[in-house]
Image (cartoon, rainbow, N blue to C red):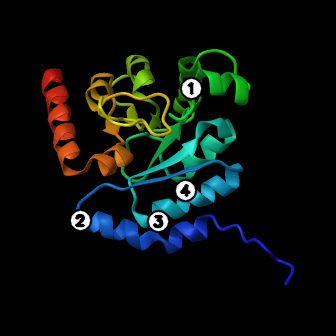
Amino acid sequence: GRIGTVKVSSLFVKNRSDIVKIILGLGFRVWVDLKFHDTPQVVADEIKAVKDTGAHFATIHLSGGVEMVKAAVLAADNLSHWSSGLKVLGVTMLTTIDKKIMNEELRIPGEVIDQVLHLTRLGRNNGIAGVVCSGLEAGAVRDIYGPEFFIATPGVRMANSKRGSHKRVVTPKEAIRNGSNLIVMGGGLLDGGPEMAKQVLVEIEEALNRGR
């Protein structure tokens, strides 16, 4: 035939909903981290598909602009931020991007934190429940938007761990002290095994106890 490629978006999410159900059945919250970035209607359809799975969080790229953000939030029925149901989190700048990459490859001038705060403001003003940003910017986001705004932080590694492709990295303790609600450590834990997991739990507990 003449069709070589078929693009699947919301249909893919719906057909993979079984894994979400399994994780929910184990008592965990589910974050569908597909970082949607498309036209407003396509992103709305994708968010609706994620919502149907019963997941708690879904991500969009805030660089998709105001109309895309509004469409995602409306599709999630997330206008009151912390109503029940799916929460939309906005990705600011990937932790694999540093100032050099942002300035030279993406042609965005200035400092990374300024771009993160700009995109956070765009998202917050249009209804998102929180953002995804590195721990280096989490403190500034928390100071501006207060305790109810959700912050998820990828690129978290123990001090003695490999960074991989991440450029903007913090430890679990630093992320929590800077205001992160959720830290992402998949690669670091897989590389370090059970012993690394124990060290991470100790560091998290220390950070939480110090904040009490």
Please give the name of the residue rendered at 39% of the width and 31% of the height, measured from the top-left corner.
Answer: 149
The residue tagged 2 is: 26
Mark 1 to mark 4: distance in Å? Answer: 29 Å
Residues under numbered marks 1 and 4 in contact, where contact means CB atoms less than 8 Å apart: no
Q: Residues within 10 Å of mark 3 (few under 14, many from 20)?
A: some
Q: Which corner quadrant holds the C terminus? A: top left
Q: Is residue 1 visible?
A: yes
Q: Earlier in the sequence, mark 1 or mark 4?
A: 4
Q: Which mark is residue 98?
A: 1
Q: Nearer the viewer, mark 3 or mark 1?
A: 1
Q: Amino acid at mark 2?
A: Leu
Q: Earlier in the sequence, mark 3 or mark 1?
A: 3
Where residue 14 sits: x, y (%)? 52, 70
Please give the name of the residue rendered at 23% of the width and 61% of the height, measured from the top-left corner.
Answer: 27
Q: Which mark is residue 52?
A: 3
The residue sitting at the bottom extreme is 1
**SS of the residue at dot 3?**
helix
Report the front residue among 158 and 175: 158
Mark 2 to mark 3: distance in Å? Answer: 18 Å
Q: Residues within 10 Å of mark 2 (few under 14, many from 20)?
A: few
